[in-house]
Amino acid sequence: MNLATLITLLFFLFIVFVFMIKDVAVVLVLIFISVSVLKALNDALERILRSNSLRVLISISIYFLFLAFTIWLIVPAVVKEFGSFYKLMMGDVNLKSWKKFFENDRILDLFQKIIDYMKPRINDYVNTALTTLATSTPKFGMQIFFVILGTIYSLIYFDHLRNLPKVLYPRKLHSIVLPFSNELFANLMRFVQAVFVTAMLTGILFFLSFEIMGLKYSITIGVWAFVTNFMPIVGVLFEYIPVLLFSLSLGFKGVIIMTLITLAIHTVSFVTFIHMMKGYSNISPVEMLFFILLLWKLYGLMGIFIAVPLTIFINTFWKYFIRPRYEGEEMI
């Protein structure tokens, strides 16, 4: 094994160890998401402002003011809607309004068993989430503090952080390491930016669809769609569950309409994502799904979020450190 490969694997194992501390992992993931979004905003401002310090200041101000305004606007409405939305979903299950969609008794019995199995677990998940939210408020406040502080410093010293491989690796390895780190960093940032944009787009489209149709819980559904779209592949399933449960109360026509709306929204989001990722790392859906399932099993919900970045790292690592061996290229 060559020196560049060995050092890179050691750094990777160190990062894996750090991410085993879930509180630290959450902070680092949120910082990277924030920095990726801010870097895109900073690059957009570069067309009209030459001063980097001024661009950083404006970008940070716009970003955090937008987040504060969004939280102030959305959180009270979501809290207000969530209680009645949850009662409606569980009430719909209790009333078994879904039975009118099935005529076969065996299918009815099977579906009944599925609902009876899911209902107490849904209650447990909701209760656990609320309890965790209530007991973790002080810790959550500290995490937000470090996210804000880390985001500001990371953006200010962005160029220094990007040149960190020059410090961590011996000079003789720069010819192989710097192209690897630059491509990895660019692919990771572009992926986060694409996911953020498509998540925002999906949430807004769901909100507008519910508003246009005159349906309740538009804000809750929009926020839920935004959050679940950060989970590659499986997020669509999590997103559609409350939409489906809600549409059951509208009858068969409502289910069809909601399903068509969901398909249309995700088609637009998928095209947007593909367009933004054009020219960047190509990831096999099979490979992505494998790592999502593996990390979900090992690491829970956080594993779903970091599965694709891990896939990007493996693909880039393979391209620069492993594949040249098979192609007979000499490496340091």
Image (spheres, rainbow, N blue to C red):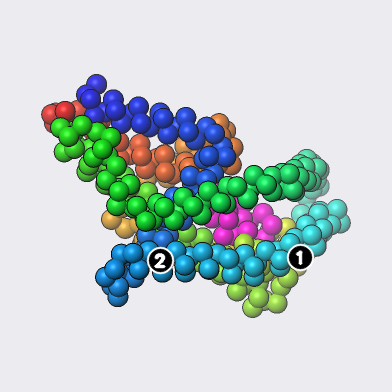
The magenta stretch spans residue 236:
yes
The magenta stretch spans residue 133:
no
Which of the numbered marks, if any, corresponds to residue 80? 1
Q: CA distance from mark 1 to mark 2?
A: 35 Å
Q: Residue at x 35, y 36 (%)?
A: 314
Please count the marks in the image.
2
Q: Position of residue 252 (x, y in %)?
A: 72, 65
Q: Position of residue 159 (x, y in %)?
A: 29, 52
Q: Which residue is mark 2?
A: 57
Q: Position of residue 148 (x, y in %)?
A: 51, 54
Badge 1 or badge 2: first in the primary sequence: 2
Going by the picture, which residue comes out furthest to the top? 1
Q: Residue at x 69, y 57 (%)?
A: 242
What amino acid does circle 1 point to? Lys
Above or below 51: residue 163: above
Look at the image and tell me whether residue 21 can be seen.
yes
The label nearer to you, 1 versus 2, is 2
Q: Are marks 1 and 2 in contact (CB under 8 Å)?
A: no
Above or below 192: residue 65: below
Above or below 21: residue 40: below
Give the residues in magenta: 224-243
